[in-house]
Amino acid sequence: MEEIRKSIRTIPDFPKEGIMFRDITTLLNTPKAFKKTMDYFMIRYKGRKIDKIVGIESRGFIFGGALAYLLGVGFVPIRKKGKLPGDKTSVTYDLEYGTDTVEVHTDAISPGENVLVIDDLIATGGTCLAACQLIENLGGKIVECAFLVDLPELKGTEKLKNKGYDIFSLVDFEGD
Ligand code: AMP
């Protein structure tokens, strides 16, 4: 796990002052670390009853797409407002300042399907919670929400667990 952790670069004060941005592009550009990451996810989820993998825009597409390929299941993108061309449903959630809206195609998930949610990182959990609401609005059942990185100080994992969701992450970052 240390190899994965070390391959993630931290950029202070991006996109604004006080944020320690955990940049996974350096992991993607390190083949051994990217492979190890995908192997951990594959080992955890192969054999589980999963019909769809939902990736959250935009870095969730990279890990979600690779995992869907490895598990031989469908991939569904959850996108920011205005990007999906077909019939869609949306959920709006609060940010520190203002709100954000995420969308999914209404025909992408059928009632009763088992769905794994994946993103690169969980911070406050707001994005993931909105994604779970979208999936449940379509009748999907959340198997688990998986992340490469957890920022425990921001309590997103705690918030989602309190709402009854199972959460899995490969590495934690605290402070610097
Ligand atoms: P949240 O909704 O607060 O859990 O934020 C999660 C989303 O914001 C993920 O899609 C992350 O890619 C991104 N994000 C939030 N905080 C950071 C951070 N410190 N470093 C990198 N990405 C972040």
Image: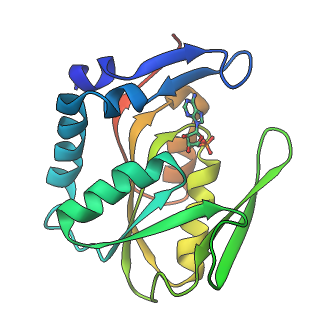
* Colouring: rainbow
Residue at 23% in and 63% down:
69
Q: Is residue 7 left or right of residue 131?
A: left
User: Foreground residue, 89 or 29?
Assistant: 29
User: Foreground residue, 95 or 103?
Assistant: 103
Instruction: Establish if 80 lies above or below 14.
Output: below
Say which quadrant the N terminus sits in. Answer: top left
Instruction: Establish if 53 lies above or below 24.
Output: below
- In the picture as drawn, the residue positioned furthest to the top comes out as 176
Residue 141, quarter of the rendered image: bottom left
Count of picture labels: 0
Location of residue 62 in the rendering, given as x and y in whole percent from the top left corner: 39, 50
- In the picture as drawn, the residue positioned furthest to the right comes out as 98
Q: Is residue 9 left or right of residue 50?
A: right
Residue at 23% in and 74% down:
49
Location of residue 75 in the rendering, given as x and y in whole percent from the top left corner: 37, 69
Q: Is residue 31 left or right of residue 7?
A: left
Residue 114, quarter of the rendered image: bottom left
Location of residue 43 in the rendering, given as x and y in whole percent from the top left corner: 14, 52
Instruction: Establish if 163 lies above or below 59.
Output: below
Residue at 31% in and 29% down:
29
User: Foreground residue, 149 or 12?
Assistant: 12
Q: In which of the image's four quarters is ligand 1 placed?
A: top right
User: Foreground residue, 41 or 14?
Assistant: 14
Location of residue 19 in the rendering, given as x and y in whole percent from the top left corner: 65, 21
Instruction: Establish if 175 lies above or below 116.
Output: above
